[in-house]
Image (cartoon, rainbow, N blue to C red):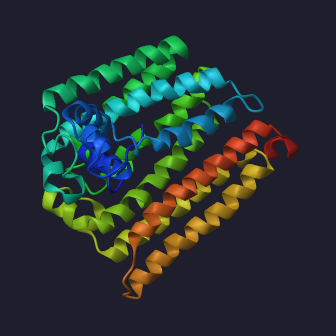
């Protein structure tokens, strides 16, 4: 259920071309990959934005491991991931439906299936709705009702609040709209416990504060695309110095949120959160300082490294949770 933007997510045609080149250029494999029988399923897969769903794995698994600290329920993890994947695929597909008009205008998204008419819009809409219904039913059946409700809430929030409501109206769109991308933490925790505990809310906050610097760094690189599409992303309406200052502020909030989880974890997570946080802050401050000095900066580097930062923190959380050592909170009597 990841809400965000990935460069190079160009669609099924590009995927088939790349695979054809890999397996023999203009040979048999190339003909197979370029055939309509293969291109059509690939177009539907591209609608789900598979690369964007990576956050689902990054956030859900460690959250579930933390909720059941010291134990690993492989079956529950797998069924939750599958249900969450269908929910994320639904949200992303319906987002493509709602954004089909601006996707045609933006160079970065012009190769998406609906932008190039690879899939009828009505078919994509039905595909997205069916995926959403299946995700709710699956999670209710395999986990619990709360998890299913949270997935449906995520889809509705992403499509109606972010895509239809905020995205084209305010430069704070990704700040509030990004809340949908935080939901894997709540879904993962609820699948294990049937509730929403404070650690899951902290993890929600981590992703919530991480989303603006992650997305604004990308928007700085593609701001002319957003301007052409009439989307008021912060880099379109503010100076680079103002944007990078906001990136620094939200990076600090992200790191502080990761530290707030320390009482519920052990020494491994604490060490990873501190070291990775210092590294992430250094990158954000370097970007801000470069802009203030009038240098030519590369915001896309921060965008890419922000993915690595979040992955490192959540991997540290997963390892810490599986080992199940005494939490630092218990050691100090919290």
Residue 164 lies, in percent from the top left, at: 21, 40
Say left or right for 69 vs 215: right
The tally of labels here is: 0
Residue 229 lies, in percent from the top left, at: 15, 56
* In-front residue for pair 182/110: 110
Q: In which quarter of the image is the N terminus?
A: top left
Residue 263 in view here: yes
Q: Which residue is drawn at 20% across and 41% down?
A: 113
On screen, 38 above or below 289? above
Q: Residue at x 55, y 53 (%)?
A: 310
Residue 217: name its quadrant: bottom left
Say left or right for 204 vs 45: right
Q: Which residue lies furthest to the top in this view?
A: 141
Residue 181 lies, in percent from the top left, at: 43, 42
Residue 325: name its quadrant: top right
On screen, 294 above or below 23? below
Residue 261 in view here: no
Residue 215 lies, in percent from the top left, at: 38, 57
Q: Residue at x 29, y 46 (%)?
A: 27
Q: Residue at x 34, y 23 (%)?
A: 132
Say left or right for 6 vs 230: right
Q: Quadrant of the C terminus?
A: top right
């Amino acid at each position: 259920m990841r809400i965000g933007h990935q460069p190079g997510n160009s669609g099924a045609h590009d995927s088939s071309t790349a695979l054809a080149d890999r397996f023999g250029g203009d040979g048999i494999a190339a003909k197979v990959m370029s055939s309509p029988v293969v291109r059509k399923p690939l177009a539907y897969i591209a609608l789900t934005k598979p690369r964007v769903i990576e956050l689902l794995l990054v956030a859900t698994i460690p959250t579930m491991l933390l909720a059941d600290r010291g134990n690993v329920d492989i079956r529950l993890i797998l069924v939750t991931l599958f249900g969450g994947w269908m929910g994320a695929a639904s949200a992303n597909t319906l987002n493509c439906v709602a954004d089909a008009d601006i996707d045609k205008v933006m160079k970065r998204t012009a190769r998406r299936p609906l932008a190039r008419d690879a899939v009828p819009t009505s078919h994509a809409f039905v595909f997205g709705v069916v995926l959403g219904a299946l995700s709710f039913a699956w999670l209710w059946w395999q986990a619990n009702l709360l998890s299913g409700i949270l997935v449906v809430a995520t889809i509705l929030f992403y499509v109606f609040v972010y895509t239809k409501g905020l995205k084209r109206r305010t430069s704070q769109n990704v700040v509030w709209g990004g809340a949908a991308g935080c939901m894997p933490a709540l879904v993962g925790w609820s699948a294990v416990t049937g509730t929403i505990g404070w650690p899951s809310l902290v993890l929600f906050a981590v992703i919530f504060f991480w989303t603006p610097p992650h997305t604004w760094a990308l928007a700085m690189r593609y701001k002319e695309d957003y301007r052409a599409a009439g989307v008021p992303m912060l880099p379109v309406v503010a100076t680079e110095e103002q944007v990078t200052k906001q990136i620094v502020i939200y990076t600090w909030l992200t790191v502080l949120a990761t530290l707030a989880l320390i009482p519920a974890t052990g020494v491994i997570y604490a060490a990873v959160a501190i070291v990775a946080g210092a590294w992430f802050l250094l990158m954000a401050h370097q970007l801000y300082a470069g802009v203030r000095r009038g240098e030519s900066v590369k915001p896309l580097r921060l965008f890419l490294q922000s993915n690595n930062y979040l992955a490192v923190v959540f991997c540290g959380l997963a390892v810490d949770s599986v080992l199940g050592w005494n939490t630092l909170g218990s050691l100090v009597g919290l």
